[in-house]
Amino acid sequence: MPPDPERWQLESFLERLDEWIESEQPPDDLRRTVTAWILTRYDDPYQGVQREPGFDNLWFGEIPRTRHGQGKAVACS
């Protein structure tokens, strides 16, 4: 069972989002999808992601509705 989301503190997500946008220059619809997903992390940071084996506190997951190009998708950890 994941830790209590009430104790979760979102750190550096918006800075990482800005870096991703600058480096990848995603289309507007993909950027909006990722941005909206990040904002849902305030409510439940563990929804749709899973603990990465071999790491004490690393969670990883593909962001829904972000598959694009030739087998590409946006993921977050």
Image (cartoon, rainbow, N blue to C red):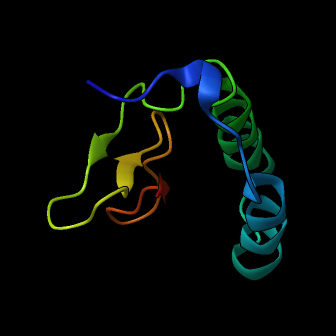
The number of numbered discs placed on residues in the rendered structure image is 0
Seen in the image, is 55 located left or right of residue 5?
left
Near-viewer residue (71 or 40): 40
Q: Quadrant of the N terminus?
A: top left
The percent coordinates of residue 42 (x first, y second) are 69, 27
Q: Residue at x 36, y 66 (%)?
A: 70
The spot of residue 24 in percent (x, y) is: 69, 75
Q: Say which residue appears at 74% left-offset and 53% top-offset.
A: 11
Residue shown at the point (40%, 63%) measured from the top left: 72
Furthest-left residue in view? 53
Residue visible at 80% across and 48% down? Answer: 28
Where on the picture, by quarter, is residue 33?
A: top right
Is 67 in front, or is 18? 18
Residue 22 lies left or right of residue 65; in this view the side is right
52 or 56, which lies in front? Answer: 56
Is 17 on the left or on the right of 68, as rendered?
right
Residue farthest to the bottom? 23
Where residue 12 appears, as percent x and y from the top left, is 77, 60
Q: Is residue 71 above or below residue 37?
A: below
In the rendered image, residue 66, in percent from the top left (x then y), is placed at 50, 44
Looking at the image, residue 23 lies above or below residue 62: below
Q: Against 74, is 4 above or below?
A: above
Q: Quadrant of residue 40?
A: top right
Q: Is residue 25 above or below residue 30?
A: below
